Image (spheres, rainbow, N blue to C red):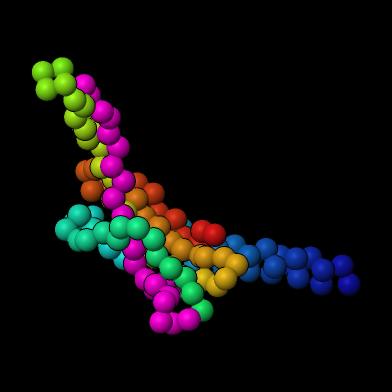
Amino acid sequence: MKRIPVIISMLLVILIFTSCFLNGGGENKFTPAMSYEQIRQGAFFSGRLIHSENALYNNLKPGLLIPFQDISGEWIENPIEGCYEYNELSSLYGYIKITDLNAQKIVFDYVVYYEDGNAGNMFKKYN
């Protein structure tokens, strides 16, 4: 009679471990929807995107890819011309992919690429 709970416990442990290995060991196999080169060569939205229940005005829909460029820089004084000039320090590229949205929340994935083109951060399902 004591063997049945032991056997069931062992089967549950085996089932838990095999389920971890069958789905890739819990690895995040996220594949970016846009490459670094595609984003750099594309156009960027300026301003705001509107979410509305009225389809005539709505800009945000599930599956929408929104590329972005994040430029960091500083203003350096040019004493010869008596003005300041903008000096770009770094430029990061990435995109946001809308996965779900309603009036209360927006769920999206996003990827940020470093300047060398390698994906630095890949995130899924962020509210």
Task: Name above or below for residue 22 compared with residue 56.
Answer: above
Q: Farthest residue in the front direction?
A: 82
Q: Farthest residue in the bottom direction?
A: 55
Q: Residue at 43% across / 68% down in the picture?
A: 50
Q: Left or right: where does residue 110 sit relative to residue 67?
A: right
Q: Farthest residue in the top direction?
A: 79
Q: Position of residue 116 (x, y in %)?
A: 22, 43
Q: Residue at 67% across / 63% down in the picture?
A: 13
> Can residue 18 be seen in the rendering of this structure?
no
Q: Position of residue 17 (x, y in %)?
A: 59, 62
Q: Residue at 57% across / 65% down in the picture?
A: 105
| Screen quadrant of the N terminus | bottom right
Task: Name above or below for residue 31 compared with residue 86.
Answer: below
Q: Nearer the viewer, residue 11 or 70?
A: 70
Q: Nearer the viewer, residue 73 or 1?
A: 73
Q: Position of residue 52 (x, y in %)?
A: 49, 74
Please give the range of residues in magenta: 54-77
Q: Does residue 117 belong to the magenta stretch?
A: no
Q: Position of residue 95 (x, y in %)?
A: 34, 58
Q: Nearer the viewer, residue 37 or 27?
A: 37
> Can residue 52 be seen in the rendering of this structure?
yes
Q: Left or right: where does residue 112 sit relative to residue 17?
A: left
Residue 14, quarter of the rendered image: bottom right
Q: Residue at 57% across / 71% down in the picture?
A: 103
Residue 55, quarter of the rendered image: bottom left
| Screen quadrant of the C terminus | bottom right
Task: Name above or below for residue 92 compared with residue 68.
Answer: above
